[in-house]
Image: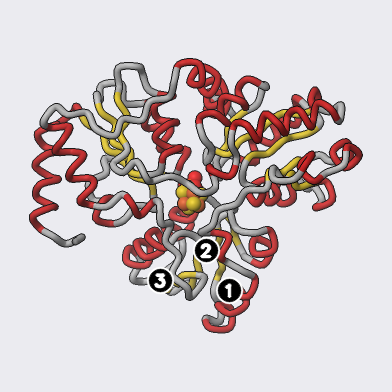
Amino acid sequence: SPSDPDLVERARAAKEKLGDKVFVLGHHYQRDEVIQFADVTGDSFKLARDAAARPEAEYIVFCGVHFMAESADILTSDDQKVVLPDLAAGCSMADMATAEQVAECWDVLTEAGIAEQVVPVSYMNSSADIKAFTGKHGGTICTSSNAKKALEWAFELGEKVLFLPDQHLGRNTAVRDLGMSLEDCVLYNPHKPNGGLTAEELRNAKMILWRGHCSVHGRFSVDSVNDVRERIPGVRVLVHPECKHEVVAAADEVGSTEYIIKALDAAPAGSKWAIGTELNLVRRLANAHPDKEIAFLDKTVCFCSTMNRIDLPHLVWTLESLAEGNLVNRIEVDRETEQFAKLALERMLALP
Ligand code: 13P
Ligand code: SF4
């Protein structure tokens, strides 16, 4: 259990024994019981940068999900080992774009005669294979905190963007930040022949959005926004850009987890907020700001089940194994994939 003092003590002792050999990263969606042992917390972008900035740590324990651990492995040196405390901590959104499907999509774009005009931009929430595809085809990775810059960069290079795999982040960024219209965007469905699109639709589109989404953020609706405005008069609604376009349009502010944290830090005492993102983070923010009224945007409980797989027992097991010299749950991306995926990640890190 989270408050089990025995487990807390065991994690502390194992971490102390490992000393500088271990560096623990924690995503903002992690449980409190895990976050207390993180050397650094952050959103996907910050954690990717922080992982790369720790060359002295032999072990990087990544408290987050599989694609984040892969990205950390790609950005760290070969002798550093990235460890994911529970191998079942995946991401349903990342699973919505497989290497085969994306290769097939590229064939469709080639047949429509537009592949040369297309620059792929892939959300961090994708497998290393998708990142490698992106690097190979001259594209970049983005996260929810730099999607605007990534799209601006891509549209300097080409006329069209293939955005993988989160349709909502792609659409929200194109429309809100780049001033495109919804008609400039088409949705590529990997389960339909030719993505369910005609060659003409592809030729007319500026943004080709992959039909993927986050199952957690996908649960917020315009009704949740209307309800909370009724329940809490004067509330400011702040949502993550993985939410649907109509939810983002109904909200007052949009931003990544890091943005949400900073916005609440800067908010005046007595202000009222409804937050549309994962529940562990919203609860932590509510506890950290007793002088503000911080509500969860929807009444139905909304943890990310795979993020939550990393719990204190898994962390204790991981740290104790490493302290005893047993390398467990290593995440290692093969060399060729790593080479191209790194290209795409480095393009992101070099964005202005
Ligand atoms: P950020 O932390 O980059 O906002 O990403 C949110 C998310 O869904 C991570 O899985
Ligand atoms: Fe994936 Fe959504 Fe969970 Fe993030 S919150 S890890 S995008 S399922």
Q: Earlier in the sequence, mark 1 or mark 3?
A: 1
Residue type at the position of mark 2: Gly
Instruction: Name the residue at 32% across, 66% down.
Output: 287
* Residue 300 seen by the camera: yes
Q: Are marks 3 and 2 in contact (CB under 8 Å)?
A: no
Residue type at the position of mark 1: Ser
Instruction: Name the residue at 47% across, 73% down.
Output: 300
Q: Nearer the viewer, residue 264 or 187?
A: 187
Image depth: mark 3 or mark 2 in front? 2
Instruction: Name the residue at 17% across, 32% down.
Output: 322
x and y percentages locating residue 18 in the rendered image: 14, 31
Locate the C terminus and report the quarter of the image it occupies: top right
Residue type at the position of mark 3: Lys
Q: Are marks 2 and 1 in contact (CB under 8 Å)?
A: yes
Find disc 3 in the rendering and name its residue. 292
- Residue 15 numbered mark, or none: none
Disc 1 on helix, strand or loop? helix
* Residue 258 seen by the camera: no
Q: Nearer the viewer, residue 79 or 47?
A: 79
Disc 2 on helix, strand or loop? strand
298 relative position to 319: left or right: right
x and y percentages locating residue 267 in the rendered image: 46, 63
Q: Earlier in the sequence, mark 3 or mark 2?
A: 2
